[in-house]
Amino acid sequence: MVGRHRRSSIGLLPRIASAAALAALVLGGAAGPTAAADFPPSDSLYHNYAEMVTDINAVAAAHPDIVEVHSIGKSYQGRDIWIAKISDNVATDEPEPEILIDALHHAREHLTLEQALYTLHLLADNYGTDPTVTSLVNSREVWIIFDVNPDGAEYDLTCLHSAKPPYCAWRKNRQPNAGTSYVGTDINRNYGYHWGCCSGSSTKPSSLTYRGRAAWSTPEARVVRDFVNSRVVGGIQQIRAHITLHTNGELVLWPYGYTTANVPRDMSVVDHNTFVAMGRKTASLNGYTAEQSSDLYVTDGDEIDWMYGVHRIFSFTWELYPTEKPTVWGDHYPADERIAPQTARNRNALLYVINVGGCPYRAIGQTKALCGPFYDDLEISRGWQVNPDRTDTATRGAWSRGIPAGTSSGGHAMQLARTASGTKDLSTGRPAGAGPNAYDLDGTTTIRSVPIQLPAAPGPLSFLYYFAHTNSSSADSFRAYIEAGGVRTQIYRELGTHVLDPARWARVTRPLTAWAGQSVQIVFTASDLGHDNLIEAAVDDVRIERP
Ligand code: 0X9
Ligand code: CA
Ligand code: CA
Ligand code: ZN
Ligand code: CA
């Protein structure tokens, strides 16, 4: 898509109005907490850091059964970065879909903190009275990080001689940069996915979009990273949908930012379709415009690229009120009278994302197939273990997850370069690999999934596979098993034959009713046990469906 809303930059540098303002900027550059900062009386409905802490603690105290507040780490200057969890049985990590919302990566984008606080109040204050809110709080675990950049947001209130005192139009964090008096890194260019790849950030500390000296050089991005990584439980990322709140432009943006390609190699077609459907539905509810983030402008190292690229979280940037204005002052400092209407405007869009976040694929009508107890397109690590019993005999050609190579024998496809989804699968013997992953299988190789809890009425197991061989025999095989309570039951097998069988993806579907209510693991084996010949097996898109 070519955006109607393409912007060439993140906004103009603030004009420094006077020598005094310049002095204030430079003084603010010193490390260490800045003096207590506050909004002017005319904007007193905005929350500074201390007022934010007071508000979230008051909500937690009023609703202790559904709200917990924790610090997930500290900013450069040592301020706590606060998160709230909102769910029934809030003290317990329940197997409920998790949704993450964060705000204030950029210091001057104060309306985003108000939107985060609004969301906390929406869920907590209406629990038990509003049926939609109640059922979402009961069936989801919602996380809100209120202020990713507390140092910057406080500093932004200290420029008493700026064009719009006390605001500084500050964007970055407050981390000094060695060898220069320019302070701060753009936290939303510091995430470690294609960091600095694509002219979507700056190498200059003076720039508003300075990416930092290395990926993850900002404590604030590391705090978000470590929290999200900690939500990988039992090999599976628990967070399914994410919104990062920014201002401004009234936009809903999906990944990627690093490339203008709609469906690059690190995004599956199914996921792209899901992003578009979720984004458009969201925008229909809040009157924003939905588009790919690079349609606005290219960024590298931004948060949502990492969330999706590494964790396959359906991650969106929302650019809040107002639409694009000619100056940063018009863009980022709406009067506090705008807080209530512009945050309430997002009520239904927030509830939609929290709801569909339980199964993002519902947005493309794929709930049954893709939102059962397990779905793995093999594009990221979801805990598969090779040789789990330490009894494998394969000296070469072990299972591995990655990008397969196209190989052939006598003009017949053996290992397919084309996966069923994305660019990765499980396959035996990648030609580029070495040691146990080297080309061609000899012996038996086994791979086993993480434990998966089946409901009382489970849908079937379904996977795509091929088993390609030349001059094989029934000593060679591809097999699928369900393992439960230490017992492994074969549910599918294909044996080798002397007839050449080239690689071709085929889907297998098998009922799991015999394991209803149990914790199971999926096991695949491939064996080359007859006379040594060419064997290639692969698996992609493994799922346990809804009934
Ligand atoms: O530039 C940013 O970090 C975000 N916009 S803002 O005006 N709030 O600074 C946009 C991030 C979304 N990614 C892309 N537009 N590529
Ligand atoms: Ca719960
Ligand atoms: Ca959980
Ligand atoms: Zn921003
Ligand atoms: Ca795949």
Image (cartoon, helix red, strand yellow):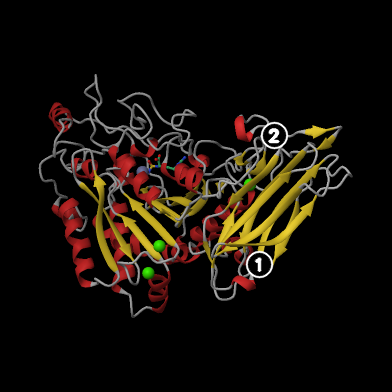
Q: In which quarter of the image is residue 163?
A: top left
The answer to whether residue 438 is seen in the rendering is yes
- Does residue 157 lie above or below 313 as drawn? above
Is residue 94 toward the left or the right of residue 223 in the image? right
Horizontal and vertical percent for residue 411?
Answer: 86, 33
Horizontal and vertical percent for residue 500?
Answer: 87, 42
Could you say which is closer to the camera, residue 525 or residue 249?
A: 525
Horizontal and vertical percent for residue 24?
Answer: 14, 32
Is residue 48 toward the left or the right of residue 148 in the image? left
Q: Is mark 1 on a helix, strand or loop?
A: loop
Badge 1 density bin: few <14, some 14–19, many ≥20, Cα 10 Å: some
Is residue 162 toward the left or the right of residue 471 in the image? left
Task: Please tell me which residue is depicted at 35% across the width and 30% down the height of the picture.
Answer: 210
Quadrant into which the C terminus falls: bottom right
Task: Please tell me which residue is depicted at 47% across the width and 59% down the height of the picture.
Answer: 287
Is residue 363 toward the left or the right of residue 473 in the image? left
Mark with earlier residue (2, 1): 2
Task: Please tell me which residue is depicted at 84% across the width and 39% down the height of the picture.
Answer: 470
* Marker count (numbered): 2
| Amino acid type at image mark 2 | Ala
Mark number displayed over residue 159: none
Task: Please tell me which residue is depicted at 48% across the width and 33% down the height of the picture.
Answer: 194
Could you say which is closer to the camera, residue 177 or residue 418?
A: 418
Badge 2 density bin: few <14, some 14–19, many ≥20, Cα 10 Å: some
The residue that label 1 is drawn on is 460
Q: Which residue lies furthest to the right in this view?
A: 499
The residue that label 2 is drawn on is 405
Could you say which is closer to the camera, residue 480 or residue 337?
A: 480
Q: How far apart are the two marked residues, 2 and 1, measured between alpha carbons?
A: 30 Å
Q: Residue furthest left?
A: 35
Q: Is mark 2 on a helix, strand or loop?
A: loop
